[in-house]
Image: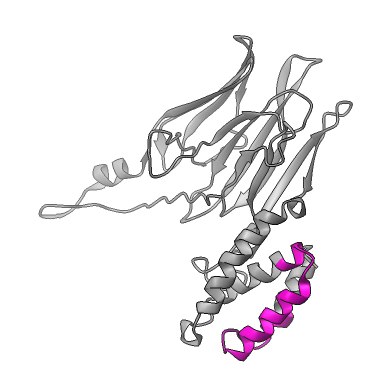
Amino acid sequence: MRGLVVLVVACVGLVAGGVAGPAAAQAQNRVQAGAVAKTSGAVTATLSWKAGQFAVTKPRLTIARGGTVVSDLDVSDVCKDCLLVEDTAGNADEVFTIMHVADLTGDGEPEVSFDTFSNGAHCCTTQRIYAYRPATNSYRRVLSLYWGNVGYEVKDLDGDGTAELSGADDSFAYAFSSYAASAFPPKVLSLSLNAATGKAAVKDITRRFPAMIRSDAARLLKAIRAAKPEENREIQGAIAAYVAEQYLLGKGAVGKAEIVRARKRGLTAPGFQTNLLAFLKRTGYR
């Protein structure tokens, strides 16, 4: 699972003989125009935007069925002062897309979704989801999912023909360490759509994928066991995520035992266990 980080730097460039003038600085902060298109079956969606200063302008979502455009939407209501990033499918180092056309609800109709990014060092991703309305032969936004600092994948994890949203729990960012040292338990969401009302619902189904959880827990435990007291307790971020994952696996006692072990090794601050267990209760892990 890949975390998605969007970094925007507003700076003044250096040129020979001194500091670049306003025109050079303005050019550095210019966001380029772009477009992304995706197809699934008879449905093709295109997200396009114009260039802007610090953010995109005039974003539009066009959706066609069988080659005929059925929705041409101004999406500036969900992308005001936001960033949109083009696909990097040709880049071997990083491949991601901000748009998906896939059946997320199991009704046989592909939903259309795209991601908007707020300006910031590593924040924030929000997924905008649009569903088809047969009665009007058009699409409307049914849901906005906030993923925060982390990214997600649209993937059929259980092979049932309906894609899940596989990401991570952003609530752990900064909770017990710096952002750089924070660790994020996996989060898997499923969507459903009420045909009568057109309303979408989200369900957390992470516990259905224990192999994924165990794999990440093993990675975190290795880092925890290698940590040293002189590292300013930054390992608390990994401990928090590891304990959360043990609760997801129904092994809360294993997680609590690791907290005790870490405390005896001088890896955690006073009150860490109390604060962590309260946090896990509040966020639904316990």
Residue positioned 51% across, 49% down in the render: 4
In the rendering, at what x and y percent does residue 20 appear? 20, 50
In the rendering, at what x and y percent does residue 270 appear? 65, 88
| Residue 224 lies in quadrant | bottom right
The residue sitting at the right extreme is 196
Q: Main secondary structure of the magenta part?
A: helix
In the rendering, at what x and y percent does residue 89 appear? 43, 34
Reply yes or no: does residue 4 show up in magenta. no
Nearest the eye: 122 or 58: 122
Specify how the rendered protein is coloured.
Answer: one colour
Residue positioned 37% across, 38% down in the render: 91
What count of labels does the image hold? 0
Image quadrant occupied by the C terminus: bottom right
Nearest the eye: 74 or 258: 258
Q: In the drawing, does residue 85 fall left or right of residue 107?
A: left
Please report the bounds of the magenta region as a residue range.
246-274
Q: Is residue 176 above or below residue 22?
A: below
In the rendering, at what x and y percent does residue 188 appear? 70, 49
Q: Is residue 189 above or below residue 138?
A: below
Residue positioned 73% across, 75% down in the render: 254
Reply yes or no: does residue 259 show up in magenta. yes
Nearest the eye: 265 or 120: 265
